[in-house]
């Protein structure tokens, strides 16, 4: 079975003290993960070492970064490199989140560089893709997300791409008052897998975990995760509430 993943994305939330308490509450639930399951905590940079320390004795729980820069090193004040993340034992990093694309103008070429640097530093990228409301209403969402994958990932050889994690974000359904259905989530996940299969073959495409990043909550996680091509979730707001995120972890296949 593909790896089933509950990834918490705290974004720019929580004080250090709140973050410690939240982790303690979630880990205190003592959820014993199966060998194919993973829980990731993508926390703000200042909390990475604390988070890694909190989870290092827990089987299949990991700290993750929310971003890294697209250069190896240099005079880039305020940025954090993949090499720096590797040096403190971070094994996962979110790349290309919709908020990074929108607010910081990250493009597919830049994200291709970030993905490569992650792999060069033994970090698994959690690559985000997804379409806006304009794209969805025009009916061109399939071509749009296919281009995101092609331009940011298809430079990778098969031995690397098989280890990536992909997260689909229906940007059109976030904060717009519209809601993506379970059927729409499965449909897009299946499409993403077919795009990967077209480039790398069915066997490799079927190894890649694809997470849903469209408002995963405690009350819809089980239904979403039961879709054949949905392998867990990239969770925002619900990951900041211990009780809710515990339920989401327990919903993993």
Image: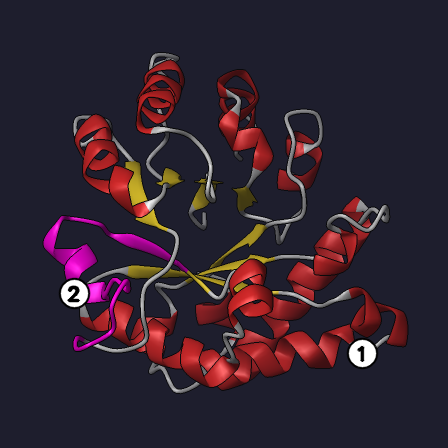
Residue 139 image position (x, y, % from top left) = 86, 75
Q: Quadrant of residue 111?
A: bottom left
| Total marks placed | 2
Q: Which residue is mark 2?
A: 83
Q: Nearer the viewer, residue 215 or 190?
A: 215
Q: Taking the image as drawn, is residue 163 in sight?
A: yes
What SS does tag 1 mark? loop
Q: Quadrant of residue 74?
A: bottom left
The residue under the point 63% across, 57% down is 169
Q: Is residue 80 above or below residue 72?
A: above
| Residue 86 inside the magenta-drawn segment | yes
| Residue 111 inside the magenta-drawn segment | no
Marks 1 and 2, how far apart at CA: 37 Å
Q: Nearer the viewer, mark 1 or mark 2?
A: 2
Classify 10 Å Cα crowding around label 2: few (below 14), some (14-19), many (20 and above): many
Q: Quadrant of residue 130?
A: bottom right
Q: Nearer the viewer, residue 239 or 192?
A: 239
Residue 90 image position (x, y, % from top left) = 22, 50
Q: Which mark is residue 140?
A: 1
Q: Taking the image as drawn, is residue 197 in sight?
A: no
Q: Is residue 146 left or right of residue 48?
A: right
Q: Is residue 89 left or right of residue 108?
A: left
Q: Which residues are magenta?
A: 73-94
Q: Is residue 57 above or below residue 160?
A: above
The residue under the point 52% across, 79% down is 107
């Amino acid at each position: 079975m593909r790896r089933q993943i509950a990834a918490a994305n705290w974004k720019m939330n929580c004080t250090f003290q709140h973050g410690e308490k939240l982790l303690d509450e979630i880990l205190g639930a003592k959820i014993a993960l199966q060998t194919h399951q993973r829980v990731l905590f993508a926390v703000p940079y200042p909390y990475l070492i604390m988070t890694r320390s909190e989870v290092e004795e827990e089987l299949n729980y990991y700290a993750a970064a929310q971003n890294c820069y697209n250069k190896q090193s240099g005079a880039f004040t305020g940025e954090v490199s993949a090499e720096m993340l590797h040096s403190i034992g971070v094994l996962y990093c979110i790349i290309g989140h919709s908020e990074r694309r929108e607010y910081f103008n990250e493009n597919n070429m830049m994200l291709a560089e970030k993905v490569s640097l992650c792999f060069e530093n033994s970090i698994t990228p959690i690559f985000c893709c997804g379409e806006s409301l304009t794209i969805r209403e025009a009916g061109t969402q399939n071509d749009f997300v296919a281009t995101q994958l092609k331009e940011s990932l298809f430079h990778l050889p098969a031995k690397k791409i098989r280890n990536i994690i992909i997260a689909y974000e229906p940007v059109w359904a976030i904060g717009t008052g519209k809601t993506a259905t379970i059927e729409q989530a499965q449909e897009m996940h299946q499409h993403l897998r077919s795009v990967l299969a077209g480039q790398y073959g069915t066997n490799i495409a079927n190894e890649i975990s694809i997470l849903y990043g469209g408002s995963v909550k405690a009350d819809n996680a089980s239904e979403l995760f039961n879709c054949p091509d949905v392998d867990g979730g990239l969770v925002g707001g619900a990951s900041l509430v211990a009780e809710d995120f515990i339920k989401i972890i327990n919903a993993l296949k």
